[in-house]
Image: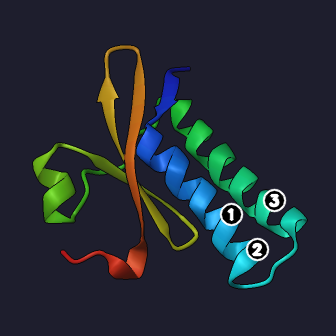
Amino acid sequence: MRDVIISEVVQQMIDELEFYLVDELKLSEEAALNRSWRMRKFVASLSHPVDYALCRFKRWRALGYRCAVFESWVFAYEIVDGGVIVRDMAYGTTLTV
């Protein structure tokens, strides 16, 4: 198992998603927290030694990031000595090749 570090950018984006789900989409706080918990659990699963392919999105590919998809969200991460750093995330339809 590898260590997984979630960047501050990704932490903030997940927190903002929770806020959006509650305030804009009017989901219950419990539903929003459940959604973010599943996202964080997925990100933690990147500790397993199986790696996804390099991203096909130019900006992330140029940085050497790999992409993992959870539902419609794409997480960009890089492999470093002893672990993984999750650097960015985006809603899949907002990304261009």
Q: Quadrant of the N terminus?
A: top right
Callout 2: helix, strand or loop?
A: helix
Residue type at the position of mark 3: Asn
At horizontal 68% and vertical 63% (from top left) the residue drawn is: 18
The mark nearer the N terminus, 3 or 2, is 2
Left or right side of 53 for 63: left
Callout 3: helix, strand or loop?
A: helix
Callout 1: helix, strand or loop?
A: helix
Coordinates of residue 9 in the picture (x, y in percent): 42, 46
Q: Which mark is residue 18?
A: 1
Residue nearest the viewer, comparing 19 with 4 = 19
**Relative height, residue 77 to residue 83 (above, below):** below
Few, some or many C-alpha atoms within 10 Å of disc 3 (few <14, some 14-19, many ≥20)? few
Cα separation between marks 1 and 3: 9 Å
Find disc 2 in the rendering and name its residue. Answer: 22
Q: Closer to the observer: label 1 or label 3?
A: 1
The mark nearer the N terminus, 1 or 3, is 1
Residue nearest the viewer, comparing 32 with 54 = 32
Contact flag, marks 2 and 1 (Cβ < 8 Å): yes
Coordinates of residue 51 in the picture (x, y in percent): 40, 40
